[in-house]
Amino acid sequence: MAVNNDVALEHALIRVPYECLNKTFRNSQKLVEKEISGVVSSIASITNNESTANSIATLDGLLGQLGNLKRKLEDARKEEASAMKKSKLRLKMLKDVEEKKMDRALFQRIRFDRVTVDYLLREGFFDTAISLAEQSSIQELVDISIFTAAKKVVDALKGRDCSVALSWCADNRSKLKKVNSSLEFKLRLQEFIELVRSRKLLEALAYARTYLGPNYETNTQEVQQALTLVAFVDRDGFVYKKLLDESRWDELIQAFQADNYELYCLSPEPALSVYLQAGLASLKTAFCYEQEGRSIDCPVCAPGVGTLAKTVPFAHHVHSSIVCRITGELMDEHNPPMVLPNGYVYSYKALSEQAAKHNGLVHCPRTHEDFQFEEVQKAYLV
């Protein structure tokens, strides 16, 4: 089946709720296996010689345990239902677009609101993102819950606490292993470094033996540098003191966010930036970064937007277009290019309007020279 361009760009829109559903199912399966195994073992431990009171107490405890399991499974079922609802709604929307049952302008508007919410969530503007999603009625088309859960980990790391991130790693260990993530090792290494920073050296060595030792084969250099830090932590100018740099926490946040995006099949860059760069690539020319060649109506020529476009390739133009620097309008046979005595070229419309306002004088914005309109000559392009 041929897929149009609108639908082809929506891989993450479909994949994210699937990954959420898959994660919830796997966690529920592990929970059931663990709890049922514990219940079976407890029942098997009850012997015929055990008193009735002890047996009843054991069974009461098992009933409470199973009650907790039931509540957790009910919560998991709600999460699964929510993910299924999102998947159905998103698939229906894309099907309607594919079959032209939805107005393309409406779909583009929804997409714009979605990518804007995505960008706001990535930048930490949660209240604004939630407000926009509610106003646009796209709550089921955006993944606020994923970013809300990630925010707890990020906030903990900003507070110099690795425990929340380590718990996240434990919950997603199998998936992280598939993508060859080193996040858990980096977190363990940071906890070791914090123990050294606090001069708890014996505790740090015990921690290293438990958590860094198993990673020695795959991270030999990092482990060696960390252990060397124990011996020379108080020496000024020690080469490995960079391990104590506070910027490592920012690197941990970036590493967590990268892994979180990969686990949910989200792009590492905001979709808004990707779309903007795609559009800017069709407009970017070498003149956009030359002071003399900038156009007032070109978005790439604007300083802020131009920075975003620096990494994208130049546009391929088969036919050249001449744009007036004053008006930003195209110069053609209806608005011909006119050459000033100093050699600079502007459109007839721009110069004639200047002459009408200033008693026949035209002004060059580049050299700030004034000329009589009669001195201007028409240019002919071959």
Image (cartoon, grey):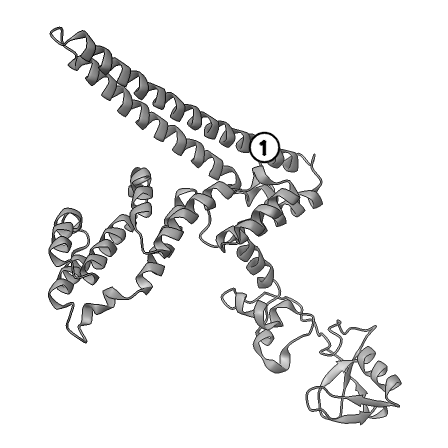
Q: What residue is pinned by disc 1?
A: 89
Query: As drawn, is 28 to the left or to the right of 287?
Result: left
Measured from the top left, where is residue 66 in percent x and y? 32, 19
Quadrant placement of the C terminus: bottom right
- Name which quarter of the figure residue 286 lies in: bottom right
Q: At numbered mark 1, what does the secondary structure look like: helix, strand or loop? A: helix
Up the image or down, 209 lies above or below 329; here it is above
Measured from the top left, where is residue 250 in percent x and y? 36, 60
- Name which quarter of the figure residue 76 lies in: top left
Measured from the top left, where is residue 115 in percent x and y? 57, 50
Q: Residue at x 60, y 69 (%)?
A: 300
Using the rendered image of the protein, determine whether residue 31 is visible from the camera's viewpoint: yes
Quadrant placement of the N terminus: top right
Q: Residue at x 21, y 59 (%)?
A: 193
Query: As drawn, is 36 to the left or to the right of 296?
Result: left
Using the rendered image of the protein, determine whether residue 261 is visible from the camera's viewpoint: no
Most foreground residue, 34 or 115:
34
Up the image or down, 368 lies above or below 96; here it is below
Q: Amino acid at mark 1?
A: Leu
